[in-house]
Amino acid sequence: MENFRLKVFRLVAKNLSFTKAANELYITQPAITKNIQVLENEIGLRLFNRKWNRTLTAKELNINPSTLWRKMKKFNIKF
């Protein structure tokens, strides 16, 4: 698992937006989406509920922090 994907995840969660994360990283929004999809496949967990043309809200984060922590620990990933 690449650290860049974790950075992408952190920025999407922080900004509650794929587009804002893309702007902050100076990459395209489809590249953000692809990195999130790869990360989700690697850990076997859907991280976000996606809504077309809408900013994500904190309620729409589809992850229990303790579940994410256990999955990340399995891969020896530290935030």
Image (cartoon, rainbow, N blue to C red):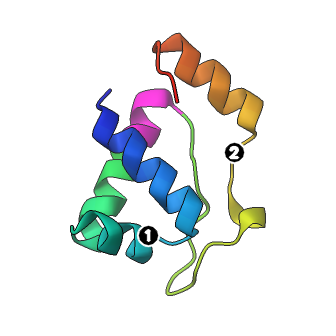
Q: Residues within 10 Å of mark 2 (few under 14, many from 20)?
A: some
Residue ID at (22%, 69%):
26
Residue 68 at x, y percent in the picture? 64, 32
Q: Which mark is residue 2?
A: none
Q: Secondary structure at mark 2?
A: loop
Please name the amino acid that badge 2 sits on: Ile
In what quadrant of the picture does the N terminus appear? Answer: top left
Whether residue 50 sits left or right of residue 23 in the image: it is: right
Residue 61 at x, y percent in the picture? 68, 57
Whether residue 37 sits left or right of residue 70 in the image: it is: left
Kindly report the distance in space between the C-alpha atoms of the residues bearing marks 2 and 1: 16 Å
Pointer 2 or 1: first along the chain:
1
In which image quadrant can residue 55 be found? bottom right
Residue 56 at x, y percent in the picture? 62, 72
Q: Do labels 2 and 1 touch, CB within 8 Å?
A: no
Q: Nearer the viewer, residue 19 or 44?
A: 19
Whether residue 67 sits left or right of residue 53 in the image: it is: right
Residue ID at (41%, 36%):
41
Q: Main secondary structure of the magenta part?
A: helix
Please name the amino acid that badge 1 sits on: Phe
Residue ID at (58%, 56%):
48
Q: Which residue is mark 2?
A: 63
Residue segment shown in magenta: 39-44
In which image quadrant can residue 31 be found? bottom left
Q: Secondary structure at mark 1?
A: helix
Residue ID at (40%, 67%):
21
Q: Which residue is mark 1?
A: 18
User: Extreme bottom residue here?
Assistant: 53
Q: Would you place residue 2 above or below residue 76 in this image? A: below
Q: Would you place residue 22 above or below residue 68 in this image? A: below
